Image (tube, rainbow, N blue to C red):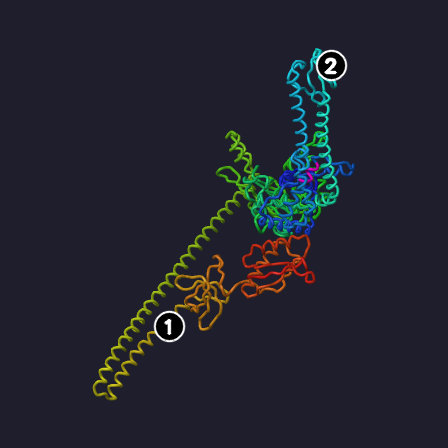
Amino acid sequence: MRKRTLEDLEFNEIIEMIRSKSLSEEGKALINENAITSDRSLINERARRIEEIETLSELSEEPLRSFVSLKNLLEYADHTHAAFDGVDIFLAGDFLVSMRALAHFLRDESLLDSELEELQKDIDIAISQDGAVKESHPLLVPLYKRVEEARNVRAQYSQSFLSEHSTIVQNQNALYRNERIVLPIKRESKGLVPGYIQGSSQSGGTLFVETFELVEMNNNVVLAEEEIMHMKHKILNDLSVRIREKLWYFRKNIKFVADFDFHYSLYRFIKKTKSRRVNIDNRIKLVNARHPLLFEKAVPISLELDNNCRGVVLSGANAGGKTVTMKTVALFSLLNQLSGYAPVDEGSTLPLFDNVYTDIGDGQSILENFSTFSGHMANVSRILSECTEKSLVLLDEIGSGTDPSEGAALTIGILEYLKKKRTTVFVTSHYSQVKMYAYNDEEMLNAGMEFDVESSRPTYRIIPGLPADSHALAIAKRMGLPKEVLSIARENLGEGATVSQLINELTSRNRALDRKIGEVELEKRRYLKSQSDNEKTKSELEKLRHEIKSGSADELRAFMKETRRELEKLVMDVTTGKINREKTMKVKSFIKTIEAKSKSADEEVEKEDEKLSKRVEYDFSEGMEVYCGAFKRRGILLKNLGKGKWQVSLDSLRMTLSEKDLEPAKSDSKPFVAAYKTQAPKPKLVLDLRGYTLKEALEAVQNQIEGCLVHSLFSFSIIHGIGNGVLNHGIHDYLKKDPNVEEYYFATPQDGGTGKTYVKLK
């Protein structure tokens, strides 16, 4: 990638943002412009790794630690076999602590074996952060106690001697000379004290004497202190030897950490900027693209190009967002080719470019005697010679440093040349001729930056298909130029104002059309709401009519029951007298008449039921979620029983209901899970997850357990392979937390060993 491109796009600032998320110096070093690639498979692999880290972060209960640099330790180890410095030993221990946190994060305990764990603990016990051996070390505690005892004996002797020989000593304070205690004796009394003279005062009146008894005591202290020094050296040597034995581990895992840290840094940047996965395709489509350097101030940019579009001419007011827009397209292309992600919404698409070329800003050079225009032309010349059909070119006001008519013609010539090379190009321009060229060319797109004329301020919104006016006079007015100047400027616009007027007219028509579309949509919503209200009212009236008729039928049935009772009583009365056939037939005839009336009423109600149920026809199917009855209880259709009847699951109950009592549940409602029907797939006896990401594997295990519970399968096995242990540990961690799992354990050696797990459900 060209240095100028990175500077123009401020990509180095983005790189620093990503590096600020790194855990190690080695990982930070991998994040640079050289990591940008056009290899689709490599981009997809990076995105997969980032997704896996996201899944692990959600499962992790403790944060990762940063990794210290072991560069000095490894370089020292290559040049000498001497013991390491205490600081380097401490850093080695700190690196192991960070590795332990990383092993927990990755669910891979093989990253740190028992020997390394023991080494880390011993370093922690022995070495402080400044590299000194801790006095609290178990091997040093008794030695320090011995030194303290020797010092106490020496101090007691010195104090006793000074007290008992007060007439020959100069004062009552023992002194230090060359790390040894001596006694201040008057010169005239030197013959009275057997020992060695270690010096005298400046006046010569005091001699510093080390008595023979004191010599031995001083020696005892020195020997005890030297024993401590020897022990410290031994501790450092022992730890150095153990570290040297594990140098292969440190070298190997520094590379492992750097590779992990590269993806982890990208993940943290993606999370901070709320980036989304970008689809890789041949067309450009950005949905709510937000420049990461602008943070919350970023105005989302949306832009979509047709497949046959090779170039975009961005026009509009100064400081209206033209340059930022095209830089955002290029910058997001680089981010996509670095990680597969960019700060956009779902549905965004970008091609893979072999290179990005830019000509933005002032190209003036005093040393090379280049004017602004000459500098631009020199850079554009290199771009035209190097770019290919897979390149992206950004040109910012390329003809602005010369005569406007020549500058416009030159811009059109460059666009035509790039179009023939099939190179994707974005150009900003104020020239009307360039806007008209793009307007008349099917492979070019005019895109105007919206400007609020009333407030004389840009909105930073892109209007594809329409050029935009420069609004120079409106901006000049807002900046306080005299009215006389603006008036003269308008008079001198002349014929040049024709295109601007056309642009303004097109923009006004576009806004009017947007308003009209909005009014039509509003009217459509009102009509649909009114239609829905009418249907609802009609349905309610039909239900009321049905309820009234049902009530009448109930009254008739009650009347029939009461009449039957009276008639039976009448029959009993009749039986007390003389019974003849005529009386009996009359009674039976009356009963049949009443029953016929009741049956007729029931049939009428049933017809109304069928008529009402057909008012709104629904296409019911097994597994569909429905509302049941007047209280709209949520259920799932289990089986079509025919004649408009369905078996329905309501919570833990099965009921038979008529279609007239059912209504499809809304699709955006909360999902309902029935006791007798489920979306879970049929479970497998052996679930093979080899080649899955951790996230995909956990979803598959979840679906497997759900399917087992539904289909009454209480044991199965999972093939996850051995690999780096991510699937193994992630799946075991999930099984440990699932309340439906009774136990799980590795398979027998002949059936897969640690690459396979048996699962038993409750």
Where residue 198 sits, quadrant-wise, is top right
The vertical placement of 635 against 88, above or below, is: below
Q: Is residue 651 above or below residue 101?
A: below
In the structure shown, which secondary structural element does the residue marked by tag 2 occupy? helix
Majority secondary structure of the magenta segment? Answer: helix
- Residue 399, compared with residue 38, is above or below; it is above
Looking at the image, residue 252 sits to the left or right of residue 10; the answer is right
Q: Is residue 142 left or right of residue 595?
A: right
For the residue pair 19 and 26, the one nearer the viewer reads as 26
Residue nearer the viewer, 383 or 475:
383
Give the amino acid at mark 1: Glu
Characterize the local packing of mark 2: few (<14), some (14-19) or many (20 or more) Cα atoms within 10 angstroms.
few
Image disc number at residue 105: none
Q: Position of residue 18 (x, y in %)?
A: 63, 41
Residue 80 painted magenta: no
**Residue 242, quarter of picture:** top right
Q: Which mark is residue 606?
A: 1
Task: Name the spot of residue 241 as percent of width and height, x first.
Answer: 75, 40
Q: Secondary structure at mark 1?
A: helix
* Closer to the camera in the image, 341 or 634: 634
| Separation of residues labelled 2 and 1 (CA atoms) | 139 Å
Amino acid carrying label 2: it is Gly
- Residue 191's tag is 2
Q: Which residues are magenta?
A: 88-93
Q: Residue at x 70, y 11 (%)?
A: 205
Nearer-N-terminus badge (2/1): 2
In the rendered image, residue 500, in percent from the top left (x then y), is placed at 55, 41
Report x, y in % for residue 9: 64, 40
Image quarter for residue 26? top right
State how many labels appear.
2
At 73% from the left and 23% from the top, the residue drawn is 215
